[in-house]
Amino acid sequence: MLLFVFQCLSTEKSEGINQAAGGLFNILLEIAGIIIAYLISKRIQFMQGYLRKHSYVVLLVCLFLSMGLQAQKAKRVKQKSLQAQHMDGADSNRVIIVHSIEDMQQLADSSLAVLLTDTLRGGLFYYSADTTTDGGTAFRSVLPGAGSWKRQYEKTGGINVRWFGARGDGVTNDAPALQQAINKAAAQLTPVLVPDGTYFIPGYITLLLPSNTYLKGQDKESTRFVTDTVYTDAAPMMLKGKGNHIHIANIGFDGGRRGTRSTQHAGRYSIVNLNFDTEPANDILIEHCGFANVFGRALLYRASQVRINDCDFEHIGRYNIDFATVDGAISNFAREGCSDVSITNCRFRDIGTHCISSYKISGLTIADNKLEHISGIGMANQECEHVKVTGNGVYYSGDNGMDFQRCKQVLISDNYFLNAGDNNAGRIGSGAAIFFGDDYSTANASNTVISNNFIRGSFSYEHLGDTAATFQNCGMYIIDANHVKISDNNIQGIGEPRKNMQQPLSIEDGNGIMIINTAKGESHDILVQGNTLTNLKCNAIYINGQSREIKIKDNYINTFGLHGVYMCAVGTNLYSQIEGNTIIDGKNIFRRDVAADIFIKAENAWITNFSITNNQIRNNRRANYQSRNDTVFTTHGIYFTADGFGKFNNLIVSNNQIHGHMKDEIGFSDKISEYSILKDTYFPAVSFNNNYSGSTDDYPGVIIPGLNQARKPRIVTESFSEHEPDYGNYTAGSIIRNIYPGNSVYAWVATNSGFAATARWHSGAVYTDGQTVYYDADVFLCKKGGVSGREVPRASDKMINDGSVQWQYMGKKVYFKELHLR
């Protein structure tokens, strides 16, 4: 009886063991039952009496135990049957081990479970009457009939490419096996599992990715897809997507090119092409992948809901310098229908032409990427809207670091640029770290914030004259754009270092922020505020063209080669402001006759409703305050000039602190005049007021615009003195108030326009530099001291020699009338 019980126990336990090893466990349980029965029989004698009296109890217990065990067995068999049906296999208590697929196909007993031990393609198989085969999860059966041997696997766990014969040795053509695995997995909505290995895809084959493809490698270093340098028109790309919901992860792709910055034209045009030449796809995810050694482009797409994250791109495209070909890492260029695209946390190095190209995308995010050594443009964006570009680093690009053509609603913030625009791309681009606007004059670039970016180049005044292989040609370039805010950026070291510094190499060379308006375009509502611009080869802020509502506010500008702020109006400049800026230490390295901290120019234009207020403008490099030995290079604090004609009306220049310039604190060219409302009826400018000069150890002085000039526009001013002016150009109506009115003289009023002088010219007199004299109604300024001759100097546009003295004619003498206190 006891032997019967243990046999039931052993039989029941054996039903719970995996079928592949069930027989072995049954034998072990049988042996265990015999051993236990023997041990118990050794002590059976003391129980014999009890068993004889109660044998019916023992029989009932054994009976109930047997019935319970049989019921459990039936339940488990039913569960196994259902599981086997789910896995397309047949329940079997017998397992046979085979070593090859061919051996399995020759098996005659369809009731067997087959354990295939093939190193690459092994697994557990069951026979099915289903005739469908795929070379990886189902193989044709030869002997039992028209059925097949089906692999036992969890369908949600993925399809392994090794099951289909992919070897991953870098030599064998794995393309057929990969394609079979991709097709099977996509149909079952399960991942394609690609183990460690190098999978070779010949250049004449393209893998097709249908909808719902999920290629999943181990990691991008150990799981690699490689190709050769053979190009065929039938297979210009390694992988081609043809549907929606495509996911590629943890795979490295190699295009077969060798050389860090190759210019060779060979090999595939792209590695991954996702619906680039078909209708737009939806839901694309590329993550943790690597792309390297590609002749053309790494990734082309035409889709919405695109995510490219944590990928490496290296040695992509032909590293040319003349834009003869347009290659790059990621692009949807010239393809419409794209939206909601995100490129994040990727790394790019040694990329030909344009690294990231985006076209007509609504909802574009490019964030936290690193770009190094880009042959052309780092990020080329055309006609995109709702764009966010933040947290990127762009190092060493041949043309613009970031380029936005005809884009709208753009945020460009918190990016870092180092020599991102060294103008090495054939010298046909602006070479700006950030380019925004419209090169094509359609005025469709608008609503943009550019803030908190750091732009650094190689130019330095400490090493002036040194050359550099890489540099930052221009900081920012804004062209034909509206509603743009440029704020809180840090820009330094801009311009191409050269030994010969006679002139800038191009209009963009050495400018911190440029705002350009073409002949067809027009800009308005542009704010440049709170930026720091230092060590610039040319102009800190450069504005040129027809524009309105340009506001330059609260910027810090220090150490520049030509002008601090350059503003040129073509046609008109309305409602613009230059306010609250600190501008110091211009260098005038090109030795121009005029180099101003604020330079205003009109090209056959009028400047109206324009204000320059509350700026601090100075040259503060003083070697010794006691000797007042200044090193001054800029000629003017504020200067107005014109090409053709230049008129101003409703111009306010007030409350500025200007000090330490070589020629004039505020000056004018001969072509600038006040605006004529009616023909030959001029109204003098009355809004140049409360501008002061003087450093920390000087008495403050009211600035008379054009004080040192022979000719200037009519500007009525109010200033202060302790005596009647003996120097300077004054306009009729100007008032000089007496700071010591104890002599009852309240002020002096200029009764005509002219130059002040109180000393009359005499023959044989000694004169010093800067002294003024008059003779009759003419005034002369001594430019070279000495002893005067016998003949009276006469008015002339040239220098006048008088004995050993040289004079400059300053115009007619101004006469003042005293105003007395009553």
Image (cartoon, rainbow, N blue to C red):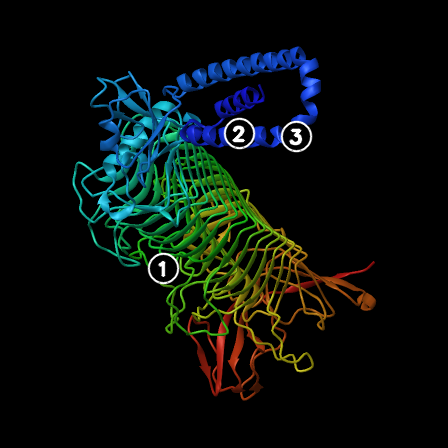
Q: Position of residue 592 (x, y in %)?
A: 44, 68
- Which residue corresponds to mark 3? 43
- Which residue corresponds to mark 1? 506
Front tag of 1 and 2: 2
461 or 12, nearer to the observer: 12
Earlier in the chain: of badge 3 and badge 1, it is: 3
Specify whether 5 is left or right of 378. right
Specify whether 494 is left or right of 314. right
Q: What is the crowding at mark 3: few (fewer than 14 residues within 10 Å), some, or many (at least 20)?
A: few
Q: Are marks 3 and 1 in contact (CB under 8 Å)?
A: no
| Numbered circle sitting on residue 34 | 2
Q: Residue at x 49, y 28 (%)?
A: 30
Which amino acid type is marked by label 3? Arg
Q: Answer with the quarter of the image where residue 121 lies.
A: top left
Q: Position of residue 413 (x, y in %)?
A: 54, 46
Q: Residue at x 43, y 16 (%)?
A: 81
Front tag of 3 and 2: 3
Element assignment for label 2:
helix
Between the residue at mark 3 and the residue at mark 1, the CA separation in whole angstroms equals 110 Å
Q: Position of residue 99 (x, y in %)?
A: 28, 37
